[in-house]
Image: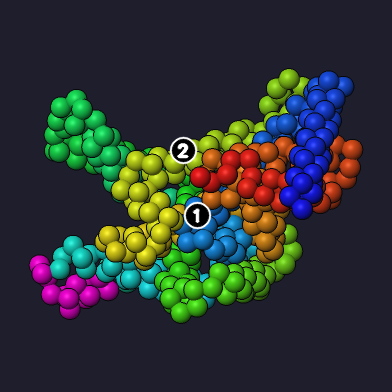
Amino acid sequence: MASLRSHFARADRVVATVLVIAILAYIGWRAVTSPEQALQFGFNGVSVGAVYALMAIGFTLVYSTVWFFDLYYGAAAALGAYGVFYLRSQEWLGGQYQVNTPVVNVFFALLVVGVAAWAIYAVLRGRLRGRISDTVLKITVGLLAIGLGVYTWAILTYPRELHQVFGPAVAIAVGIGFVLILRALYERVAGRTGLRVCTAVVGVLAVALALFVGSYIFHSPGSKLYLSWVVSSLLAGTVALALYRGLYVHMRQRSRSPLIMLVASLGILLALSAAISIVFASAPRPLPDPFGTVPWTIGGAFVKGFNFFVVGVAIAGFLGLYGVLKWTSFGRAVRAIGDDEEVSKVVGINTTMIIAIVFFVGAIFAAMAGILSGHDTAIQPRMGLLLLLKGWIASVVGGIGNLYGAILGGFILGVIEQFAIWDLAGEWKDVVAFVLLILFLSFWPRGLLPRK
């Protein structure tokens, strides 16, 4: 019996090797016979692969932390794309498509109130315990949450003034981010170099940077499209937080079954897809081209500036997340929870809050993938399901649970899809992706870069 299993294992390795050689030979043959077209397919594949990589990164982050497949991230991709359309369609389409709905604005405002109240209270309760009464804290947090809800309502209700309404918030976020980055760098180098930084100087620089950014955005109406990306991504992340705190926490405590969590998230995906169809109708909708329609010519291939931007976003997102997970206390907590959540609770890690942030960040990655995909092709309510499946395939190819594998698998999947349809119709692209999934599950179930 052992010799028979060994024989089959050797046969599998032979088949897998032959398949890899055949794929590489085909790509090499095409590159030699038609180098310009091969370069075009290569650029297209890398651009599409960057979108898949963003989906895979968010998916991998959540899965490697809580170890279940959250299908909401397909809906998060669709929410991101339709959020941009919601905020920009009135102005971009000349007012022909009046999509702004008071019910939607009030719904998201109330959602922000609930999520903000829970998050702010959870953060401040431990830090201010004994310094302020719980009643005063709850009232203060409630007022802050209501203020954020009203602010969200104003952003959604007046999208034509988005650069003026949302610009100050971006400026404040930039200033805070500047301080946090300097603080992280200081903590890493101060002990080794004896460096001392004046807090007042850092504060002045942060305020100056925030004022500059706020003034620039306030006087730049053309920034509204890019601000809508931020708003849509944050709303998708807010929905993820609400789902986690309002549903997933209780289900994980009671059932502790990945299958039940999977079914619940599938229901959420289908429900949100149906809601998008009700609000926007099922017809495909376009998004504006953010960097113009004139392509660049590189080696005989035509490439838009947006394609390079998509690749840059994927790489920057990967590097930023990698740095956070590797060099911050939050990253150490995420890794600890992924290894053993119960032990993490024992050592004092606030697992509920850390996992909530993970869900929030993962949804932002998914929303950005949907936004970037929507600018390249028309958006439709069920676009999130296909993007979710492609992100999952990319994760399997790269290695489920491995952040390196997520970005590698995304780019590989995109390139293989493009070259595979060279002699086929474009409709075969999805077939190729699922055939690749079957091959990897059959011969390389742990992916190219298995999680250690």
Q: Which residues lie in the magenta part?
A: 130-142
Nearer to the camera, 299 or 183? 183
Depicted 375 relative to depicted 248: above or below? above
Which secondary structure lies at badge 1? helix
Q: In whole angstroms, how far apart are the C-alphas of marks 1 and 2? A: 17 Å
Query: Is the image coloured rainbow, by chain, by secondary structure, or in one colour?
Result: rainbow
Which secondary structure lies at badge 2? helix
Q: Is residue 165 left or right of residue 199?
A: right
- Coordinates of residue 300 in the picture (x, y in percent): 77, 22
Task: Tell me, yes or no, if residue 308 can be seen here.
Answer: yes
Amino acid type of the residue tagged 2 in the rendering: Leu
Depicted 27 relative to depicted 391: above or below? above
- Coordinates of residue 305 in the picture (x, y in percent): 62, 32
Is residue 13 covered in magenta? Answer: no
The residue beneath circle 2 is 319
- Coordinates of residue 253 in the picture (x, y in percent): 43, 76
The residue beneath circle 1 is 64
Amino acid type of the residue tagged 1 in the rendering: Ser
Q: Residues within 10 Å of mark 2 (few under 14, many from 20)?
A: few
Q: Residue at x 65, y 63 (%)?
A: 97
Q: Residue at x 82, y 35 (%)?
A: 18
Contact, CB < 8 Å: mark 1 with mark 2? no
Which tag, 1 or 2, sits closer to the chain's start?
Answer: 1
Q: Quadrant of residue 272?
A: bottom right
Nearer to the camera, 325 or 213? 325
Q: Residue at x 54, y 63 (%)?
A: 68
Task: Tell me, yes or no, if residue 418 can be seen here.
Answer: no
